[in-house]
Image (cartoon, helix red, strand yellow):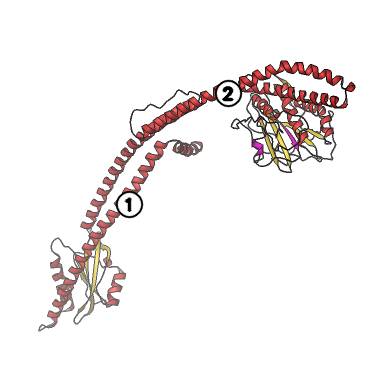
Amino acid sequence: MSRALLFFPRAVRRLWRRSLFIRVTSTTLVLSIVVVGALGLLLLSRVTTGLLEAKERGSVGEATAGLGEAQRLLDAADTGPSTPSPSRLVDGVVTSLATRAGSPATFEVLLLSSLSNAGAPERGTNLVAVASVPPALREAVTSTQRQSWTFTEIRFLDGRSVPGLAVGAPLSIPTVGPYELYYLFPLAQEQQTLDLVRGSILAAGVVLVALLGVVAYIVTRQVVVPVRAAARTAERLSSGNLDERIPIKREDDLAQLARSFNEMAESIDAQITQLEELSRVQQRFVSDVSHELRTPLTTIRMAADVLFESRDSLTPAIARSAELLQNQLDRFEALLADLLEISRFDAGAAKLESESVDLAPLVQRIIDGSEPLANSRKLRVRFAAYERPCSAVGDARRIDRIVRNLIDNAIEHGDEQGVLVELAGDADVITLTVRDFGVGLRPGEAALVFNRFWRADPARARTTGGTGLGLAIALEDARLHGGWLEAWGEPGAGACFRLTLPRVAGGSVTHAVLPLSEEVADLDPGEDRHDSDGAFSRERPSVRHDERAVHIDESIVMTVNIDSGNER
């Protein structure tokens, strides 16, 4: 039951966010209810105020006239040959005023003594109770000696009660003393009128809100249905069906929107077709050129090998030229190989040859192979493997190429603090980080470092003779496995690259095991503990994701700038 109660609000919120039709209709209904309610309350308030003010004016006028009549009766009785008793005076006044009320009585009368004398006579009409007069009204009449009035509840001795208006004024009775004369006007008729008006306003409001709801439904449907049709067409377009168009049946603004959308779709279709053709031409050109260059390159390589092997018998200038030719041919061959590999990725022809791979010895072999380059740079590569064996099912050749590119790149851009390589895994993924402590990356460069032929500093010296495609190929290899390849760096703090692969190629990667930040290096650079394979081995602290890490995904556009330079 509690789960259902929690699910219902979420479902309502989700439906509210996703449905324009429900939002517009509901908002219209709510605003209609608020507006109609406000107008109804205003109208009811005006009607109530008008009825009560009219009743108040008439009642005060009637009470004033009755007070004058009562005073004339008392004055006439006082000037006669004999003065009646107090009881007869009070009865006469009340009887006279009751006659003015008519039948049925339009008001009730109470004649109360202002003194606390228990013997003073008090009278009222039609069993009206003294409790009908509020104490505050009596206090106002006796203290100010002026006419006062207020709304109250008229009560009778038989238990009845009705809403009413009480008007009081001081009255002096000869030989008796000060009295108070109260007129009590029932408001039952006005209450019936207000009830009728209230019911009419409520019924009219309900009908009006219902009509507004129907109008909102019709109007919103006329807008939402074409929008939904456009959304469905856009979804089919995004899924690759470029022939989809919005049907146009009208000539209004929505039809104009549909025509503009169809024109945009036709333009996009034409541009995509043109770009696909250009891409095919480019890929075919790169592939053809790469293949065609292999034949003359093989001949040049044979001649260059002959010159290089006989360089000892050549003059120093020619021998140096033979060495330069050999180096540049090596670089040219590497560039051709990388271009061929990139063309296979572009053509979608790259495939995995999956097998079980233990990454720990694979990484160790690559580090051992990079030792001459590291020695030339006078730095040390440290390796920490937190899991042995660290196995995954993937393409060993491509994983080897990714790791080799990352380590060679780190050695080239590292400093005397060396390079730190870490390897760890859990039940789902394996993560490898390669960290250098060199010049690092400026803000925004982590998203560009995998672009083809991109370089951070055109003036930076190149020592490894790379092609500028190594990291781009590494990214494609990681994607082919279904993994991530990410970069992080700060100026002066070095850079870190993180490779995350699923345990089985093509699996889902949702997290990384090792962090990607300046906190990666938590090993003491002077610590030289090795395991049996010569690698650092220790228990890795709890890991986390670094919010500054830049994840390179399919949204990054790979740009080609035919200009040699550093890979990052």
Q: Quadrant of residue 186?
A: bottom left
User: Mark 2 or mark 1, which has the lower sequence index?
Assistant: 1
Query: Residue 528, percent across and down?
Result: 85, 36
Q: Helix, strand, or loop for circle 1? A: helix
Report the magenta residues as a range: 432-453
The residue closer to the viewer here, 456 or 364, is: 456
**Magenta region includes residue 440:** yes
Q: Nearer the viewer, residue 144 or 339?
A: 339
Q: Amino acid at mark 2?
A: Ser
Left-right relation of 309 to 481: right
Q: Residue at x 30, y 53 (%)?
A: 41
Is 208 contained in the magenta span? Answer: no
> What is the x, y in percent for residue 99?
13, 67
Q: CA distance from mark 2 to mark 1?
A: 65 Å
Residue 1 at x, y percent in the picture: 49, 36
* Residue at mark 2: 279
Q: Circle 1 sits on which residue? A: 38
Residue at the left extreme, as displayed: 81
Give the residue furthest to the right.
Answer: 313
Residue occupying the point 66% across, 23% down: 342
Quadrant occupied by the C terminus = top right
> Magenta stretch: dominant SS?
loop
Asked whether, in this view, residue 432 is left or right of residue 156, the answer is right
- Of residues 93 and 335, the one nearer the viewer is 335
